[in-house]
Amino acid sequence: MSSETATNPVTTEIIRNAFIAIAEDMNAALIRSAYTPIIYEGKDCAVGLLDEKGDVLGQSLGLPLFLGNLSLCVQIIAEEKGWDYYEEGDCILLNDSYIAGTHLNDITVIMPIFWRGERIGFATSRAHWLDVGAKDPATPTDATEIYQEGMRWPPTKVYRKGEPQTDILTFMKVNSRFGDALLGDLHAQIAAGRTGQKRMTELLDRFGLETVTAAKHDIFAQSERMEKEAIRAIADGEYFAEGMLDNDGLSDDPVPVKLKATVLGEEMELDLEGSSPQTIGGVNCGFTQTISAARVAFKLLINPERPVDGGTFKALTVKAPEGSIFRAQEPAACSWYFSSLGLLIDMVVKALSPALPERAAAAHYGDSMVTTFSGLDQRRDGEFFVSVEANCGGWGAWEGHDGQDCLINNVNGSFRDYPIELYEHRYPIKIRRYGIRTNSGGQGKYRGGNGCFREYEVEQDVALSLWFERSKTTAWGLRGGSAGMPPKVTITLADGEVDQSTLKVNARTVQAGSRILIETGGGGGFGNASQRPADLTKSDRQNHYTD
């Protein structure tokens, strides 16, 4: 086959879209097969179709932070063990925070794809498992070292050349509070991988390896060229931003984050020198995940309409000091790694806003705002339950547009909150109120998005855990816009006592009849509020976005 035929632009576009379609099929297989609602309802998962060197061919909608580093995990393992480590029929499991970057609940599954005896790619996925044997159910908010956060797996072959490693699988099952569901979710990820294997080999059977490879190189080259052109259009220079987390969950000390973005020609560097050393509490992450967050921020500004592939991010360099919250070392706790990364993403946009005023948005509410309940469900003969829920909030406004109301935060992408009907069916908890938090978005010519409120009433004694962030560095405005409101939690105990001082807590017992009202933050406004058109102000009041 001639090179001209192999790189026919029509064929290249067909193959480009086939890569994405394969990833979408993988994601559908995972969600439909999953055992726990955090995956099949919350969609706390992502998949990636990679080439033989671990570069991205296609990916589905999913959590941006997961999509950013599945390829890095494959490449890191190959650097350590060699590419021959990946054998036909293998299924490799990984959750080590210092390799994958995230917390131990996020499980990476890697399955090599072979065609006619040659390794031609990988079908990969990552999903949040409800419980991996931490000291407390789900994800403890007060862990001080990684050993308290659950089972930690380096790259481990749970299937070897197609054969299940039953001793490993049994060990995993008995070390989780939901062992059957754990294995069920694992096999849902395996089903996603097998779907990717099947679809990819069908694509190669149709077009042949030469044509698919030529198309891949064209796709990668186009992405790299477009990216460098976009960076060249930014004025060379150094751009800065800084912020802080409220605390690390254990102390009251703020956790500083500092960023320097350097643009030089067609290259960009993001340097986190000066950010906090790793903390005792779990706001640390492995460097792989920091790279992923930086890529999310970069993609928000640089060709955001183009899908990510192996040619993307070639012009981006990320640096973080060893032993910092962004490049944590053992035994740092990493359960709540995403808090600093959500702040980092906003800061990259803020730093570059003077150079990209037409693209930069004000900050969003910035964190997952997690509520967790656990206990023995008296409706089901004392069956143990855990509910874990991220909550939506307000996004920042930008030139020409109000911020989005009640949208999940930027690290979570396609994550969904649970439908009330499903929630009340599965757990001994009622949701009494749920709606838009009026006035929580920052004011401006364009209004910041509003957060939400959600009120739970527990029907029996339960353990409550909370992780709410960004009450000190709230969602800032840009170009004269005001900041959004911070988050707020009101706990009204069954005896009438009211607590409004708690944003983070681990496994606090609350009695039947207690109510927990969570209110998430709003996004920052954009521009001077005095310039907001009167008809928009009237509409805001009519829709109860503002008073």
Image (spheres, rainbow, N blue to C red):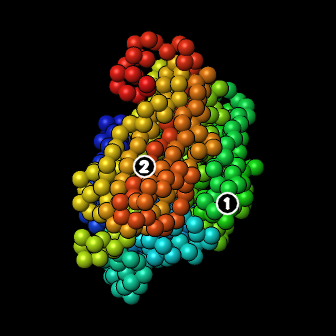
| Pointer 1 or 2: first along the chain | 1
In-front residue for pair 484/109:
484
Mark 1 closeness class: few <14, some 14–19, many ≥20 residues within 10 Å = few
- Whole-percent x and y of residue 382? 29, 76
Mark 2 closeness class: few <14, some 14–19, many ≥20 residues within 10 Å = some
Horizontal arrangement in the rendering, residue 4 relative to residue 268 (left or right): left
**Quadrant of the image occupied by residue 160:** bottom left
Horizontal arrangement in the rendering, residue 320 relative to residue 91 (left or right): right
Horizontal arrangement in the rendering, residue 42 relative to residue 500 (left or right): left
In-front residue for pair 112/116:
112
The disc at residue 421 is none
Residue at 44% in and 38% down: 451
- Whole-percent x and y of residue 482? 58, 27
481 lies above or below 474: above
The disc at residue 517 is 2
- Whole-percent x and y of residue 305? 43, 34
**Viewer can see residue 118:** no
**Viewer can see residue 490:** yes
- Whole-percent x and y of residue 434? 34, 43
527 lies above or below 173: above
Name the residue type under label 1: Ser
The disc at residue 251 is 1
In-front residue for pair 507/32:
507
Work out which quarter of the rendered image holds the C terminus and state it: top left
Does the CB distance between marks 1 and 2 fall below 8 Å?
A: no
SS of the residue at dot 1?
Answer: loop
Cα separation, mark 1 vs mark 2, equals 24 Å
SS of the residue at dot 2?
Answer: strand
**Quadrant of the image occupied by residue 181:** bottom left
In-front residue for pair 384/515:
515
